[in-house]
Amino acid sequence: VVKVADEDRWKLIDFATACDDGDQVPLHYTLRYAAPEVIKAAAAGAASTGRRCSSDMWSLGVMAYELYTGERLFGVMTNEQVAATLAMPGGVPLPGLHNIEPNAARFILKLLVKDPKERWTAEKGLDARFFRSLDDTTKMASAAAAVASTLHNIAGKVDRILDLSLVTLKD
């Protein structure tokens, strides 16, 4: 997802790598958004991998964490530390989750499960209380201004993450 600033709109991109679940594809990834199974395949020297929707769900979890907390998931960790954290057993530290809405925190927790078989699928995620609570909130909003304000806040968080990503890319 990219914000086109001069047009003040969002654009969904990167369909050049779109494929069906299970397709064998070259191993390309962005470390801080890659699922643990992708990092393990890379560490094992794989040149390609079987594409899995569960890997995309991990990436969605990383983005949701960053949007809701306003912080990068791996903070100031080096790339080596990030790779080690993803490859080692145990969970990923999620220090900002205690400060956000409980349904959003649960949604993120279920996506950031290292075992892809235990990670929520898209279907399970869409059925989560997180989306029902957003729907309820929207229904309860008596004015469009409340919804517009929420969307403005989310856009601000996305802008901060994009700014952080640009800094990371420059480094």
Image: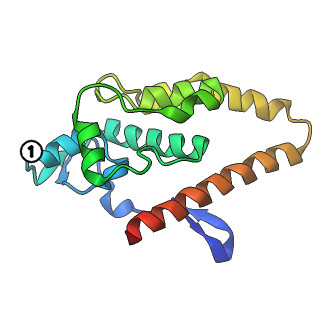
Disc 1: which residue: 44
| Residue ID at (86%, 35%) | 141
Give 108 or 141, whichever is nearer the viewer: 108
Q: Pinpoint residue 39: horizontal percent, then vertical percent.
A: 22, 45
Give 116 or 85, whichever is nearer the viewer: 85
| Residue 81 visible in rendering | yes
* SS at badge 1: loop
| Residue ID at (91%, 36%) | 142
| Residue ID at (77%, 31%) | 137
Circle 1: residue type: Ala
| Residue ID at (75%, 27%) | 136
Q: Quadrant of residue 56?
A: top left
When the figure is inspected, residue 124 is found, relative to residue 26, above or below; the finding is above
Q: Residue furthest right?
A: 142
Q: In this view, does 63 lie to the left or right of 91?
A: right
Q: Is residue 100 left or right of residue 18?
A: right
Q: Is residue 94 left or right of residue 33?
A: right
When the figure is inspected, residue 108 is found, relative to residue 40, above or below; the finding is above
